[in-house]
Amino acid sequence: MIQKKFDQIDRRIFSFPAVHPCEAVSPVTLLSSLIILSQDISYYQSNSFATQRRNARETIRQIGILVVFLEEIHDRGLVVPESAVLCFSELHLTFQKIRFLLEDCSREGARLWILMKSEVVASQFRVLIRTVATALDVLPLDSIDVCGEVKELVELVAKQARKAKIEVDPDDERAMRRLVSVLDGLEKGMEPEFQILKWLLDFLEIKTWSDCNKEVKFLEEQCVEGGEEREVPFLTSLLGFMYYCRGRIFDTLDGPNVEQTDVRCNIEVLSCLNPQDFRCPISLELMIDPVTLSTGQTYDRSSIQKWLKAGHTICPKTGEKLTSTELVPNTNLRKLIHQFCADNGASLAKTGKKSHDITRTIVSGSPAAAEAMKFLSRLLVRKLIFGTSEQKNKAAYEIRLLAKSNIYNRSCLIEAGTIPPLLNLLYSFNKSIQENAIAALLKLSKHASGKKVMIESGGLRSILAVLKRGMSLEARQIAAATIFYLSSVKGYRKLIGETDEAIPALVDLIKEGTLCGRKNAVVALFGLVLYPGNCQRVIDAGTVPLLLETVASLDKHELVTDSVALLATLAESFDGAIAILRAASLPLITRILQSSTSQAAKEHCVSILLCCCNNGGDEAISVLAKDPSVMSSLYSLTTDGTAQASKKARSLIKILHKFHETSSSGQGCQALTHEQSVHVW
Ligand SMILES: *[C@@H]1O[C@H](CO)[C@@H](O)[C@H](O)[C@H]1NC(C)=O
Ligand SMILES: *[C@@H]1O[C@H](CO)[C@@H](O)[C@H](O)[C@H]1NC(C)=O
């Protein structure tokens, strides 16, 4: 295997994982591979680059000339002497790197970064071209039978490659200086001039909102994944600059995805309920770098590596023999954990390993970024209030993006006063405006002062209006998630529960919503019943049968875990337990107890069963006692469950034992309770 394909998305920018051709490869194979590589390189046109045009042009040109030579050998089937192999394999290595470098220079979204890295990029080009020169030096041209003209060309390339002036383009240099002065200005609290921003973006050929957004996304990734820690403040400044440009320069949202909301649910909401799934089963710490084994179990990379290093060959959790020791990064989970930490102000860094991810903290990352964010927040408030409807829509959308994960950004936006005008937009008759406004509010509601401002400026009524009569299901389900965040404040739980609308509207959403909508509604109700006074209201609204239906129809979906979580809380009250018994749902709950793969779900199921036994008496217990599988599920929980789960399982086992004893000794007593309970139900 001589030509390994690397996935462009996976390769970090400026990393050149070129492969050496293997030793035994024949000159002919090597030659054809070289030709393919150089053709790939000639497909790049220097004008597909915003910067580094001259260096790219020079490199592509020289390799273009070498192709003529390589193709002649190939087409005429000339014998390549063994002694040429060294040169060819060096070229092969270098061409791969050149191809990567060209790829980086034309990478979508990386224009600003490449510009700011002009020095580094130019020196990469220089090194690679000089390496080509060195490789050609050892080429035994005389022993290859190509025509004289071609030989001359090769010699020419060798000479030029050795001498070529490869440095930063003066145009790039000028643009870089302008940008640095904008950043300096920002740092001193000076708002950048529109004309200069426009000039810079034009230079980089960033022409639309979505071009700009690509730059933002790229820089965001670099901040999180990015290499060296010392670069992060600078990256953050660039990012702040790009955010500001995106908000200021482009008034029109373009691109296919703009109107679409995140396909995934407001999933982070849910994860708050089961944070134990974020912990490494080995270290019990939050996972920094979750990886999945061939058995499908996920562990933190450092823990599982220690485990494997110690010579173990089985999966620590399931005991299955490992078919491979490959560790697959679980990026989704990783994102969720980061989100969870950001939302809860927790930090992953304390676990010893340094986290580069400063974007998720309450500090701004860099003074220039901080100022950019403040200017941007004020600008957005003005647009929300005085803008055309298009500008309002766009401003709401920007806020929605900016407030996504960054605590500092959220607080800037809240302080600047974005919440009251966003609340006003909830009454818009335009679906897109309403959706963007409620989604922006959702993000801001994760911040403590955001909740406060929302409630104090009378926002609850507007949010409930969207929950009930939003123009789209999407808007309604986002409103439900917002209610969840608001209900994380003790005092607001009561307030929200006591409105006439909130609980019935959430219950309606369980009936009518998509999976995401139902999920958000269930979780929001869960948030509300943390105030015991709301329990009865939730039960009265007919929630229990709906939840049971959900559990029965979805089986393994994560919504099941959330539904049983809510049921477990409701079952603690007499009416809640009775509602479950009335629906004859104990077999359903025991089935989930047995089959669920989520520890959290199992624990909730035991709680439900326990509450039902305590409230429903022998009638309930006798149903469980008839099912032999219950005992074994309970016993296994006493050993692998959490302390809580194991305690509950033991209580339930005790109840069942007692029942067996009494029912085998005194039958009469059971009949009596039976009658009683029938009566009660
Ligand atoms: C806004 O958030 C992004 C990422 O969420 C972060 O990188 C950026 O630095 C933040 N802006 C400021 C001014 O902190
Ligand atoms: C909603 O507002 C946006 C932005 O002004 C506009 O592009 C869109 O056409 C409007 N939609 C409707 C249905 O009026």
Image: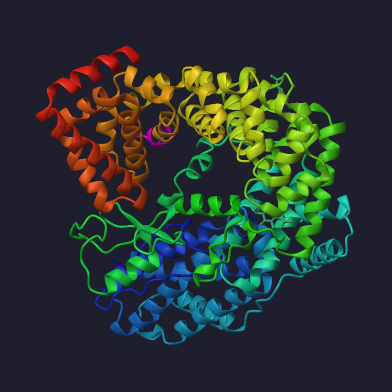
Q: Position of residue 474 (x, y in %)?
A: 57, 26
Q: Quadrant of the N terminus?
A: bottom left
Q: Is residue 254 visible?
A: no
Q: Is residue 281 visible?
A: yes
**What residue appears at the point 47 percent right and 17 percent down from the top-left corner?**
542
Instruction: Judge whether residue 562 is colored magenta.
Output: yes
Q: Who is closer to the viewer here, 79 or 637?
A: 637
Instruction: Tell me the chief SS of the magenta region.
Output: helix
Q: Position of residue 44 (x, y in %)?
A: 55, 58
Residue 598 lies left or right of residue 246; in this view the side is left
Name the quarter showing ligand 1. Answer: bottom right
Residue 599 lies left or right of residue 8; in this view the side is left
Task: Report the colour scheme.
Answer: rainbow
**What residue appears at the point 19 percent right and 32 percent down from the top-left corner?**
659
Q: Quadrant of the C terminus?
A: top left
User: Which residue is outermost to the left?
Assistant: 664
Q: Position of residue 466 (x, y in %)?
A: 66, 23
Residue 314 lies left or right of residue 271; in this view the side is left
| Image vertical order of residue 236 relative to residue 92, above or below | above
Q: How many marks?
A: 0
Dividing the picture into quarters, in which one does residue 502 lie? top right
Q: Who is closer to the viewer here, 196 or 583?
A: 583
Dividing the picture into quarters, in which one does residue 484 lie? top right
Report the magenta residues as a range. 556-563
**What residue appears at the point 66 percent right and 79 percent down from the top-left corner?**
165
Instruction: Judge whether residue 648 is colored magenta.
Output: no
